[in-house]
Image (tube, rainbow, N blue to C red):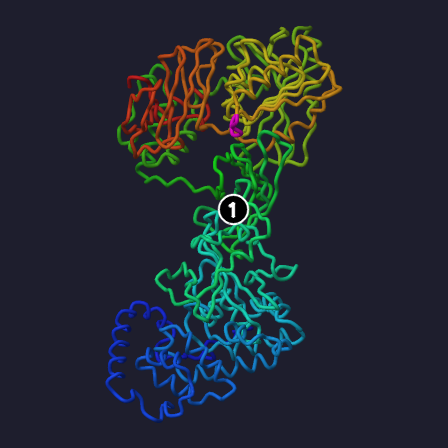
Amino acid sequence: MGGRFSSPAILNPTREPMNTMNRSFDSRTTRAGAVVLFLQLVFVFTVSGVRADDGDKGRWWSGKVEEALGRAGGNRGELLRFLGKVSDAHRPAASFLLENMPQRDLESLEADYLRENLRLAFEARAAAAWGKKLPEDVFFNDVLPYMSANEAREAWRPGLREKCLPLVKECKSPGEAAHELNRKIFKLLGVRYSTKRNRADQAPAETIETGLASCTGLSILLVDACRSVGVPARLAGTPNWVNKSGNHTWVEVWDDGWHFAGAAEPDSRGLDHGWFQGRAAQAIEGSPEHAIYATSFRKTGTSFPLVWAPGVDYVSAVNVTSRYIPAGAKPQDKPRLLVRVLEGEGGERVVRSVELIDRADLEKVLRGRSRDESNDTNDILTFKVEKGRAYELRILDGERVLSREYRCGGDRQDVVSIFLADPSPRKLKEADEKKLTAALKGYFSAEEKKRAGWKFSKSLDKLLAGNEAAVRAAAWKAYLEAPLHSGLKVDFDKHQVRFKTHLSPYTVKDVGKRPKGGWPLFIAMHGGGGTTQQVNDSQWRHMQIYYRDQGSVTGYRYLALRAPNNKWNGFYDDYVYPLVENLVRQFLLFGDVDPDKVFIMGYSHGGYGAFSIGPKIPYRFAAIHSSAAAPTDGQSSAKTLRNTIFTFMIGEKDHAYGRLKRCRSFNEKILKLRGDRKDIYPVTMEYKAGYGHGGLPDRDKIKSMYPAVRDPVPAELTWEMTDGAVKDFFWLSCPQAYRGRGIDAACRKNKLVITTREIKDFSVLLDERLVDFSKPVTIELNGRKVSGRKLKPSLKTLVETLSRRGDIRLAATVSWAPGS
């Protein structure tokens, strides 16, 4: 076994099987206590409990040692044989061992094992350059002991000394030797960190045999390696970090004082450095759960917290928390986000570049690298975040970028796990899949009137309830293949989009490579407006090259949209919103576009369009940008931007039509709506001093917008209606939308809270992303509870909302309306 010493060299120090000895002890504690009591009684009523040849005649030991012998039960003879052959020079050390020995060891350890451990400990001290300088109490407590915690007892000194001594022969101090061992011994023995180890409390033989160990197993091995060459060492750890991320064990070594190191995690800076340093600084000395302890063979009255063996209390400890807290340290001042990246659900951790982008300031980006299986499970990439703020979390996986929205709502920390491979939808049974496919094909192939009265079988509703992801995928596939998109396909091929009599041509080009999830789509709108055809065409051609290609991002599709007319409000009238929705629908059907990565932006006339289209239909976009424009009275509501990134750039000298004044007023409304919260209204006014209407520095805006990802089902909605053209808003729907009406809605923990303004006829569109259908859903409308029952998913609702909205991510499985 290359580089390892084999397990036969590890001697069994007891008369029990090595791999069961410490496991069986705990279950025998009560029985062993009874045996001990019996033997003590026998001892009281007899002159002597052992034969003269056991070594009792030449008694030299203390009363404390004699007391320990009295508790040894049937193993007293072994311990007496050990004591009987101890040299005068080693008697204090032998006494120390027996006086502090755990009960399990008094009852089981053999004389030869103890004798060899004692001899090799003194030989290691004599051979070490620092040996003579070691205080006796440190040597006794942290070099001499044969154990660290509750691991199996084994003769590890000979094999480890043989491996370790050559590694430290040039070292002049115990600290230098410990660091050198930490750098080299694990590689030499072929041992690494892994959650797949057999058990947490492995002794060296099992760790070396399997090559795998937990932080505790690695620490036990490093402590024993240090002790084998005369370096004082002990375990240190906490039962639970203050941030509740779990326990951790590491190593402390003595070099004119105690110093720490992560086992198998040597830091290039030497001792007293490690990934857990910041967490250790937050430890709480007076908290049994959050303090830091170090093991002690000498009995202290305090037990080391063995999280993996909570019933074991015989490992003594000292509280060393104060050494880890810097002088003047303050409590954690900011919440933290911990990010783990895994291959898939239940898969292993992997290393990837991670970016955290502040949604209120897209230029503010925090970066780091996730950890893999070679790191401790508690070693997690950590970002300091602002309470209440919204962020975009990006994982850079080769050419693919995975994005997730994160909102910091707590005071302490959140742990987010990102799976590189999304869990595949549960595969449907062949018969169910065949039945579902036929039903979906029939529905999407039918005429509109027939679809209105279509009824799916209850068995398919039941299938949906238990397999929403798979049924959604089947519905989207059937919708894509349906013959009802022929008109859209003709326009797509001609690079044009229409709504009724309004027709807009567009150009489209690809920049970079297609991301794995589909192309992001950037829709750019030109300047001009109420002018001639020639001027507007010229402005459109300029917009085709206006926003510069961004080679630093993976890739996207850039679409320059021509206004459907040459009117003043060509990009912000009632026909524009359904026209843009049709444009997005085209590209979801035929353009291979990621539905959560659609963006819209514009300059001047196009900027007015963004200021109107964005707040009207924000559910279509990941982010919106307007330059050199302003909100239009009655068209642009700040309230609807609760969940959508919206930026607007305005120059200091752009006063025509009250643009700057209107922008400032809009920004004030946003600030008032946001209040003290930072997780809502990710809207930013970009004021540019010295600039007028033209030449604003926005030509690289795509780069800063690119990371954004739409959330199609945010937990909170505010829908202020400004006309009757838009009848859907995220997961709300209103067939009679009128200016001045509105709905506020929130959905959390299976509770819907809805407040309406002058609206009675509306629907709430739900699915498993918002609620758990296996539990009742409480619905509160205008301060009164109106429902508290389970809701049943419907395939008819899924296909109807998909047909109406053309986006599977906006499709729902339950439609609830007042009175239903």
Residue, disc 1 = 341
Q: Is 794 drawn above or below residue 567 in the view shown?
A: below
Q: Work out whether residue 271 or residue 401 is closer to the camera in this orientation and state it.
A: 271
Q: Residue at x 52, y 44 (%)?
A: 339
Residue drawn at (27%, 84%) of the image: 43
Residue 643 percent location from the top left of the image: 51, 26
For residue 213, side relative to residue 786 (left or right):
right
Q: Is residue 690 left or right of residue 30?
A: right
Q: Quadrant of residue 439?
A: top left
Magenta stretch: helix, strand or loop mostly = loop
661 and 163: which is toward the camera: 661
Magenta extent: 676-680
Q: Quadrant of the C terminus?
A: top left
Residue appearing at x 53%, y 10% in the figure: 575
Q: Is residue 125 above or below residue 498?
A: below
Question: Which one is nearer the viewer's eye here, 337 or 459?
Answer: 337
Percent x, y of residue 769:
40, 32
Give amino acid for label 1.
Answer: Val
The residue under the point 47% across, 79% down is: 9
Magenta stretch contains residue 677: yes
Instruction: Determine the secondary structure under disc 1.
Output: strand
